Structures are given as structure tokens and as C-alpha cells.
Amino acid sequence: MLTSNLDEWDTQDWLVDARNLTAWSNSIAEKGPLMLLVRHSHRVAIRSLDEMSQTGITSLGEAMAGEFGRRLPTSRSVRIFHSPIPRCKQTAEEIAEGIRQNGGNVQSVKPLFLLLGPIVTDTQLWEKVGDDGVGVASFVTSWGRGELGDGIEPFEEFTNRVTNGTVDILRASEPGLMHILVTHDLFLMGARKTFMKEEARDDQRPPYLGGFGLSLIKNQVFVFDARTAENMKV
């Protein structure tokens, strides 16, 4: 059972992007579909590959994911997709519960393989991400330049999968629907490079529950960057 904790939501520094995302989702008057791509909620530090695939979220992470859901617009039906990794699944379930507690309608909560991130066959490449993901920006930069070899899918193929799994779905979506995709920092930084055409930087690494939004307005796709609170055309 989720308990409301307004002080934590308002004061935790890592929730700035999450607060921007929920405010933005409530500010869109147009009835076109929306999509939020967000990182999972708060977790403990990760120090190994096993922990990377098994770590869930903390009790604080559960509470804040619920608060995130409670702050989304109830005027929109919601479909939630998540990476199969436990912390993303748990985050998705808590967001869904928060939406329902606030009177919103959650149509479904489902895993989506796309949200795991790039397809990696050489597991030693994960060492380049560094302890607790400190090297994720440099990893994305090297990957985008084709410097990681054939143990990871080419960045162009990832870009195509991301576009097919986000923009194409948004364009085919019914009016008023909101999609929430719960994923990882690596996926989000690769998607950011796809949409915003920027080189990855350490200061772009999304905090927990951070990320960006996509909106379809008059058949034009816009991306909302939660870090800068800016909208731009895709």
C-alpha cells in the first residue's frame, strides 16, 4: 500500500526532472497522445553485472514512483510499458497504483523488450559503463561512433528500433492516450541522442524518474526535455 509523502517529493533534488515531467503532462491542453520515457525510481548502488540485472527499487523509490503516478493527469487513459528488469517493473507497478489511487484509468502494464536498451552479445562491454553507471555517457559516445565493436548492435539499428517503438506508436495512437515507458539511463541517453542529435554528456544522465516526454500536436511530434523544461520539434 502506497503512502503519500509530499515532503520527500518536494524536497528530493533527484526529483526535479520528475516534477517537471508531471507538470508538463498536466500542461498539454491538446488532446493528442502523449508519451513519457522515464528512468526507474530510486535504487541502491550497483557494483556488478548480477546486480545490474537483479536490483529492485528502495522503499523511497516505491513511494516516489507512486507520487509520480498521483501527479499525472487523470483525464487521460494510460498504458504503461517497462523493461523486464525488476526495478523497472516495480516502478511501473507503483506508478500505476498511484494513478489508480488518484482516480485515473490504467489500461495495461506490460513488459517491453525494447526498453532493456541496446542488444549486447559481448557482456564484457558492460564493464565500460563503470560502477553504478558512472561511465554511461562515454559508453553512449563510443557506441555512437562505432568504437565498441560488433558485440553491440550498431547505433543506427538501435535508433530505428527506438523510433519504431516511440514516434510510430505515438502517431498511431488514439487521441487523449498517454503512454509511459519505464526504462534505464543507458536507453534514455541513447534515445536522447536519437531525438536531439546531441553527443552524450555526464550532465545529461537522467536522475531517477527523470527523462523526457513526446507529444503529438497537429501531426507534429515535439520532445520535452525534463532537464531544461524545453520543448522542441523532432
Image: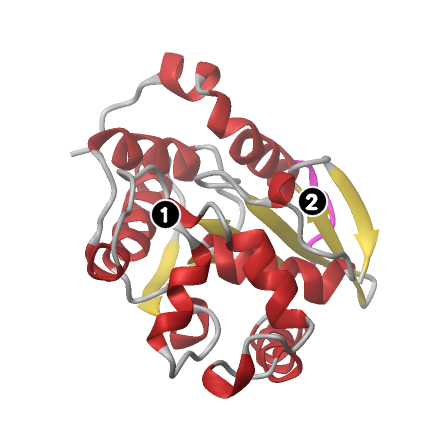
Quadrant for residue 111, please give it: bottom left
Label 2 sits on residue: 225
Q: Is residue 100 above or below residue 181?
A: above
Residue name at image x 37 percent, y 42 percent? 99
**What is the quadrant of residue 106 in the picture?**
bottom left
Residue 62 in the figure: left or right of residue 116 = left
Tell me which numbered mark, 1 or 2, is placed earlier along the sequence: 1
Horizontal side of 166 relative to 208 (left or right) equals: right
Q: Nearer the viewer, mark 1 or mark 2?
A: 1
Question: What residue do we see at 67% from left, 54% from top?
Answer: 200
Query: x, y percentage for residue 5?
Result: 32, 18
Q: Amino acid at mark 2?
A: Asp
* Coloration of the structure image: secondary structure
- Between 130 and 1, the one lying in front of the other is 130
User: Quarter of the image containing the N terminus?
Assistant: top left
Q: Nearer the viewer, residue 20 or 51?
A: 51
Please name the residue shown 57% across and 34% down the image. Answer: 17
From the viewer's perspective, tell me whether residue 210 is left or right of residue 93. Answer: right
**Crowd tier of the residue under label 2, counting other residues whose Cα lies within 10 Å: few below 14, some 14–19, many 20 or above:** many
SS of the residue under disc 2: strand
Query: Which secondary structure dominates the residues rendered in magenta?
Result: loop
Q: Position of residue 117 (x, y in %)?
A: 46, 69
Disc 1 versus disc 2: distance between alpha carbons?
26 Å
Which range is magenta?
27-33
Q: Where in the figure is residue 55, as x and y percent of width and height? A: 22, 51
The residue at which mark 1 appears reads as 131
Amino acid type of the residue that numbered disc 1 sits on in the rendered structure = Asp
Q: Position of residue 85 (x, y in %)?
A: 28, 62
